[in-house]
Structures are given as C-alpha cells and as structure tokens.
Amino acid sequence: MLSRVADKIYWMSRQIERAENMARILGVTSNMVLFGTKETREQNLLAPLTITDSADRYFEQKKPVTLQGLVDFLALDPDNPSSIYSCLRSARENAHAVRWQITSEMWESLNTTWLEMRRVRRSEIAGAGATKFFDWVKDRSHLFRGVTYGTIMRGDAFNFSRLGTFLERADNTARILDVKYHVHLPSVKDVGGALDHYQWTALLRSVSSFETYCTLYRDQVLPINVAQLLILERRMPRSLAACFDQVTQAMERIEGHDRAAKRLASELHARLTNADIEEIFKDGLHEYLTECIADMNELAVRIQRAYLGTA
Amino acid sequence: MERRQKYDEMHAADGGVRPHFGPVAEWLAQTPASRVAEKRREADLLFHRVGITFAVYGDEAGAERLIPFDTIPRVIPKAEWDELARGLRQRVDALNRFLHDIYHGQEILKAGAIPAEQVLKNAGFQKEMRGVDLPNRVYSNIAGIDLVRHSDGKYYVLEDNLRTPSGVSYMIENRKMMMRLFPELFERQTVLPVEHYPSMLLETLRASAPPRVRDPVVAVLTPGQYNSAYFEHAFLAQQMGVELVEGADLFTKDNVVYMRTTSGRQRVDVIYRRLDDAYLDPLAFRKDSMLGVPGLFAAYRAGNVALANAVGTGVADDKSTYPYVPEMIRFYLKEEPILANVPTWHCGRPRDLAHVLENLAQLVVKEVQGSGGYGMLVGPAASRSELGVFRKLLKENPRNYIAQPTLSLSTCPTFVKHGVAPRHVDLRPYVLSGKEVKLVPGGLTRVALKEGSLVVNSSQGGGTKDTWVVE
C-alpha cells in the first residue's frame, strides 16, 4: 500500500477516536463540576486541559476556566487542532483523499458526520444540550468503527485503521487515568470518602466501564481496582492491555521490513501482559503512566517513520 | 461546407425517425413522462452517491458538481461507426508517426509538407525529446478526438486531444447508469459494449512498458484530489487495479522511478500521467511544480520508465498544427484522409487575418493553446463588445488564434425543463495506441443544454449522454 494512503487511513481513524475521547472527557467533566467544593470544581475543570496537553494554549486566550469556555475551546474551536470540530474535519479530509481505497460506506459515514457537525450551533450545546452533543459524537465514532469493521477488506487499509484507532485509545485511557494524580482531594480524610468515590466512578463512566467494574469486582470503587481494570484487564476494551492486543495484531499483519516499530510494540505488549498492579502502585502510578505515554509516543514516531513517511 | 438546415441525429429532414433510432423513439413515445422524471431523479441520486462529480475551477476550493446526465441516448449505426473508427485509427496513427518524425529525422519538414517554424517554434515542441526512442514509437497512447456532425450530415474532426484527454469515465458510467435505469431499452436492440475500456487501457499501458520489463508495474499519476478530473483518475486506477499516485508518492534513484509503500520502495515501469508536461518534473520543467517528481524526466529519457502520454505531444494537437493533419496522413500513410477537417484560418497569416477580421461575426475564434471552451469566441452568439475585445486581441497577437466557420453541430433529442427538445451534441471517442491502435465502439457525447448553445464543455454548462453503437 502507498505510504501516503496508509498515512491518511491511520490518521483518519486516530482523529475520529480522538473526537470520541474528547467527547467522553468533556461529558464527564460537565457532570463532575456539579459536585464538590469550589476548589475541586476548579481542579475538575482543569482536568480536560491537562489530559489533552492544551492548558498553555487555553490560557493564551486569557479567559477564565469555565465549562462553557472548555466546550468552546475543546469541542468547537476550528483553530484548535484537537477540538472535536477539527478532528471531525480532518478525519473527513483524510477520508476524502483516500475515498477510493476505503469503502463507500466509510466515506459516507465520515462525510455525513462532518456535514452535521457544521450545522451544530453553539447555543444548542449549552447546558443540557451538551450531553446530547457528546453522545452524538460517541455514536458517530461507534458507527464509523462498526462500518469499517463490517465493510473493509482485511488488508493494509484495515490494519492501519485499527492501528490508528487503538493507539489513540490507549493514549487516551492512560491520560484519563493519570489525571486522577492531578486532581488532589481537599484533604487526606477525603480519600475513600464520598467525594473520592464519586470521582473514581465518574472516571469509570467516562471510559464506559462502570458496569464492567461492578461485574468484575463486586466491590466499592477502589483506586487499585480501577487501575487494574484500565491498565491490565484485557476483557475491558478500552484498557491499555486490550488496546495493545489490537495494536500488536495489526502490526503483525502489516508487511514490511521494519523491525524497530514492531519490536517496540511487542515489548509494550509483553510489559502489559506481565505487569502486576501492586508493583505499579508501589513504584507510583503516575510514573508508570508517564512512561507508558512516552513509549506509545515513541511507537507512533517509529510507525510514522517505518510505514507512513515523514509526517 | 454549405449551410443548410441543422442535422438531427434522430429525425430525418422529412420529420421521420431514422431507422437506427427507431427503438429509442418508440420507447420515448410509450413511456409516461412521470416515469422518466422519476428515473432522472434516481440517476442524480446515484451519481451523487457514487461520487461521480467534477471540481470546477474558480468555485470554492474542492466544490463538486454533477455533470448533468441526459437519459436519451445518442445512437450511431454500426456501419457508420466502422467508417468513423477506420478514420480515427488512421488519424491517430499519422499523428503518432508525425510526433516520432519531428523528434527524429524531421522528414516531413524537409519535404516541406509542413512549414518548419510551425513545428520548431511551437510552444508544445519539447527540444529535450529529440532523439528519445519510445516503445512502439507511440507518443499519444490515449487520444481523444472531438468530432462534430455538420448540417451536410458529415462528421468533421474539430480537435485532436493528444495530451491528457479526459471524460472516458463518464462514457463508462453513463452506460452503467442507462443499463440500471432502463434495462428494457437494451432488450430492444443490440448495443455494443464499452465497459471493457479499462482492461484495454491496461493492456495498452503494459504494452508500452520499456522493452526489457517482463511484468510491468503500472500507476496512474494524478495532480491530486482537487483536480477537476480526480474522480476519473481514481476510477481508472481502481478499474485497472493499479495504484493511484501523486507526485510525492514517487521518487527517483539512479534514473529509476519508485513508489513509496508501507513495505518499502517499489519500482514503477509505466506511468499513466494525468499531469501536464510542465508539472512533471521540477528539475526539467517548471521549477515551482509541487505536483511532479524530481528526476522523472531523466529516468524517462534513460528509458527506465514509460510515460503515457509521452512528453511533447502538445505540438501535434495544437490548434495551429491541426490544419496540417490531412497532410500528415498523406505524407506518412500515402492515403487520403477518411475524416474531414474543418476549414481553418491561421490568424498568423496576414491574408487569413484580414478575412477573419472582416467576417468575425460569422466565425468561431479559438486560442491556439486553449482548451475546455475557455478563451474562445462564437461570432454569431457574441455581443458587440465581445467582438470588439476579440478584434483587439487578434490584432495584438494574431499568431495566438485560429478561426473556423461556425459549424452547425447536429442536434439530438434531450430532456429539458418542458419536455424533450433538440440540443447540440459533439462526440469524443478514445483511441488507444500500444502495439496496435484500437478503440471501444462508442465515446463520450457531450450536449449543450442551453437552447441554441454550441458550447458543450462541462465547465461551461454542458451535459453528457450515453453513446450507443447499434447493430
């Protein structure tokens, strides 16, 4: 497959997944700011900026951090390259460039998403409308992934699409989990309290895994279990381990002489397979996740170099 | 060329239906208007969904439009087509021989059949192509020859397109659409197939590979998704099962061309390029070209890659070279031309210019290098001020223009707002030259949808029709 075509398919899939994750993060944030003290509210509002590495950019605007401000910036801002709006636009542009190498259903799905996004009014996603909008973004992403899985030939177009989807998802899960580190609780006595419980639950809901948690642990929401679920539990489709099952599968199917990217992918996969959550906690969850995010970033660089040409 | 009543493809002068149009006329009379209208809406929807669109220059970037598709076919009897096909093969053969000659021995210039300056000073003449030997000595592997039928009932060649003629995808898609919408029409008579064009094209391209290559790798080179004919580039690549590449997908090393793929570099032997000469290679032609491949021309000259069409064909399809094509046929083939040329005045010649200026309101004036209906004056349809503008242009730069009598293009019944009415049509068959010269029975019929209009170009509001050659 031409590198340029693979590149567009990979990024198209990353961007739609990124839009979905952004909707998840904003969805849970808009819920969390309804609770807690003034201080925790402020921290919760900062979380989406921390997760997406875009705090500096936000503060350049010299605007206070409010929910509406976040929605404007992270969902609707056409100049912010990681806003939902921009992700849907780029995904559609990439699809347009390769519409003869993907199925017409895939193209139509992304094209329709973009046309609908353009019709969205700011006033419609204020207050209660926000949830509806975030749900719509998630639905469009689910639809696209389903259409892709159900229609495209099993070949490099499929492989690079899967690679993009699951690398992006793994990165997001790691960042969402890591943000707990930044959101300090007001005092030590709150650990394990109602507020803490609420925040961990919200985190689980943001990655659609509250029900899975209940099924697997039948216990109150404990940080170590949440980390186990989101990092190591292969049955949870948004966990790092589950994402890396998909990443390594896709990498194995891709033909090519590259070793560097494939080796790193298997290394990361093996590390996730053999890890122990108690040890991770002993050495520090934040340190572990920071390393994961850096390694995934390095993997993306190597994939770009080996298959997709310089970005 | 005397002027008489217009020639209608369906109706003879006495109003009767020509026999080869019988089944279509009968079907038109029997089918209720509401059903036809419904089918036309269905066609629009299908074209949109499949994405058969074209971009229009000057519109918002990337804006896409449908080319209007008319559901009444244009029918040509087989005997008439066979004669046309003979004429087309003859003409393209002579044009290819001409191109080989002017880039080698220049016999035709030595013999004085064509003035040397007409060729050597032509902007389309590529000096770098002198002495370059091409597989099968073919320069224009894919030629689109524009034909019109005058009121005398005869076909005339209006223009040769030897560089990157487009439109063939519409020929194929129009047929698919007609078969899908009106299968019953195809039961009434035998329509010769055109759908094998892509496989004929692939065969032609593979036959044009550098001689040492056993199993040639073919690619289609496009300027990219914002090009007006991008749909066609993608369509043909997909139908032939070859890669659709952009300039940045290719690179050269030691005079060999490679594609960048996910499993490393892959050698390319034949490039069906839909990119003008000027943009092919920034090292050889326009330095600012972002669309081309540095080093491509050197690899080409070294014989390591074939380009279809070849570099330097523009000199032969230039409107100022056009009047000499009958001479080429006589010179190289020792035959009389089967297809007629339209009488043409060369504004570069003082006597011709005087005639043109005097009769401007009756003539069609065209820019020598123009295409797509841009830079052209249709005298009888022009306003006073438009005539004035061209008068000035002609005096300033006469060599840049040719003039022809206004042909009364034949008409074909066409759906318009208020029913069916005659509209002017032309015909572009596609001639393929590899080891041999061949073509599918049919071509693209373009129709001027505006009443009385003679401009059929899609960029100027023209539509298309399915073209049937019937037994």
Image: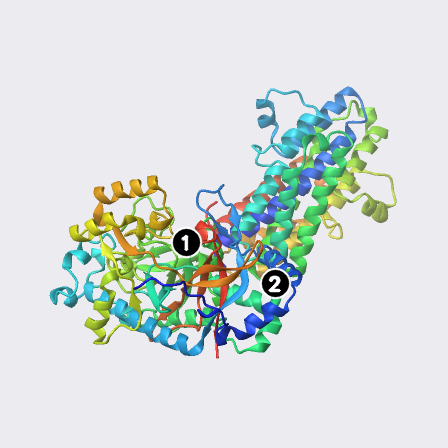
Crowdedness near tag 2: few (<14), some (14–19) or many (≥20) residues, C-alpha within 10 Å = few
Horizontally, residue A207 falls left or right of residue B199, namely: right
Horizontally, residue B346 falls left or right of residue B44, namely: left
Could you say which quadrant of the image residue B77 lies in?
A: bottom left
Q: Residue at x 42, y 59 (%)?
A: B166
The image position of residue A184, as x and y in percent, is 74, 26
Q: Amino acid at mark 2?
A: Arg
Of the pair A70 and A106, the residue shown nearer to us? A106
Of the pair A306 and B261, the residue shown nearer to us? B261
Count all numbered tags in the image, as a single digit.
2
The image position of residue B65, as x and y in percent, is 52, 50
Crowdedness near tag 1: few (<14), some (14–19) or many (≥20) residues, C-alpha within 10 Å = many
Q: Residue at x 20, y 56 (%)?
A: B127
Q: Mark 2 to mark 1: distance in Å?
A: 47 Å
Which element type, helix, strand or loop, lies under badge 1? loop
Does the CB distance between marks 2 and 1 fall below 8 Å?
no
The residue at which mark 1 appears reads as B455
Q: Residue furthest front?
A: B14
**Dot 1 falls on which chain?**
B
Q: Is residue A230 above or below residue B468?
A: above
Res. A251 in view? no
Closest to the camera, between mark 2 and mark 1, is: 1
Res. A60 in view? yes
Of the pair B436 and A299, the residue shown nearer to us? B436
The residue at which mark 2 appears reads as A154
Q: What label sits on residue B399 in the rendered view?
A: none
**Dot 2 falls on which chain?**
A
The answer to whether dots 2 and 1 both sit on one chain is no
The image position of residue A150, as x and y in percent, is 68, 60
Which element type, helix, strand or loop, lies under badge 2? loop
Q: Is residue B137 above or below residue A146?
A: below
